[in-house]
Image: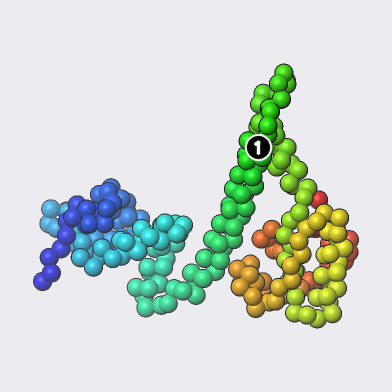
């Protein structure tokens, strides 16, 4: 009979706190193999790998509830990947939004720092911060990335032309993609034509020119 580990031993091997293991037990994501007569939690050595899986899944951004669901499916003999794939696509989309937000902030701050001489005698609280804010406001009116998912049919071509007409004066980048592209999978495109703006699906179908203008013109 293999020797079971006490909670402190497992915590030390995994580099986590004992309180973390108690919390995982309460959440149902990592139950002890059994309890001693004294009530102490006892863990099987192979649970160390499960604990590492939980920790690494959290580092990827999964919640404990999501991790528990994956483990439940796996333990029941099901393959969880079909349910995990859409979750990962949503996570990628949120990360892309976050990355874009951070990129814009970084560029605004660098722009402010690049100013040769801050204004002197200004009534504003901080000219550098106002320069960064103005940069963000200015970028909001500038180019965006617009992706049009098309199968190459006449209706799709009509959609592309209307999109280009709507953004002709703002310098936006219009990219055409196929429905079997990796980006289509990422955005969950189910039908074409479809229009994605800055990583967000905003329209499916053939827009009128007025609809395209309303969707894409700032």
Q: Quadrant of residue 9?
A: bottom left
Left or right: residue 64 compared with residue 95: left
What is the x, y in percent for residue 37? Answer: 12, 57
Q: Is residue 171 above or below residue 77?
A: above
Where residue 66 appears, x then y in whole percent?
44, 62
In depth, the one of 45 and 140 nearer the eye is 140
Q: From the viewer's side, name the closer residue of 47 and 117.
A: 117
Residue at position x 62%, y 39% from top? Answer: 109
Looking at the image, the residue that sits furthest to the left is 1
Rendering coords of residue 29 (x, y %): 34, 60
Quarter of the image with the N terminus in it: bottom left
Position of 21 relative to 111 (above/below): below
SS class of the residue under badge 1? loop
> Within the image, what quadrant is residue 75 found in?
bottom left
Please indicate, yes or no, whether residue 105 appears anywhere in the rendered image: no
Report the number of numbered marks.
1
Instruction: Kindly identify which residue carries mark 1.
Output: 114
Q: With 156 as the anchor, is 179 left or right in this view?
A: left
Query: Which residue: 28% across, 51% down?
Result: 16
Q: Residue at x 61, y 73 (%)?
A: 182
Name the spot of residue 12 as percent of width and height, x first: 22, 53
């Amino acid at each position: 009979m293999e020797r079971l580990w006490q909670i402190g031993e497992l915590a030390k091997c995994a580099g986590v706190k004992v309180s973390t293991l108690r919390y995982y037990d309460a959440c149902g994501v990592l139950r002890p193999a059994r309890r001693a007569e004294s009530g102490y939690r006892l863990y099987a050595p192979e649970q160390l790998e499960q604990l590492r899986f939980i920790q690494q899944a959290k580092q990827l951004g999964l919640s404990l509830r999501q991790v528990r669901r994956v483990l439940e499916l796996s333990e029941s003999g099901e393959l969880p990947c079909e349910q995990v794939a859409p979750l990962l696509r949503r996570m990628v989309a949120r990360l892309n939004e976050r990355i874009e937000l951070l990129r814009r902030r970084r560029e605004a701050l660098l722009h402010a720092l690049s100013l040769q001489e801050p204004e002197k005698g200004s009534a504003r609280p901080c000219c550098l911060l106002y320069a960064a804010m103005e940069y963000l406001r200015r970028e909001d009116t500038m180019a965006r990335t617009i992706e049009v998912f098309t199968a190459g049919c006449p209706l799709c071509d009509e959609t592309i032309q209307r999109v280009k007409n709507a953004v002709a004066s703002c310098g936006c980048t219009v990219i055409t993609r196929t429905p079997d592209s990796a980006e289509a999978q990422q955005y969950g495109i189910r039908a074409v034509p479809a229009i994605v703006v800055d990583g967000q699906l905003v329209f499916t179908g053939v827009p009128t020119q007025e609809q395209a203008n309303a969707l894409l013109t700032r």
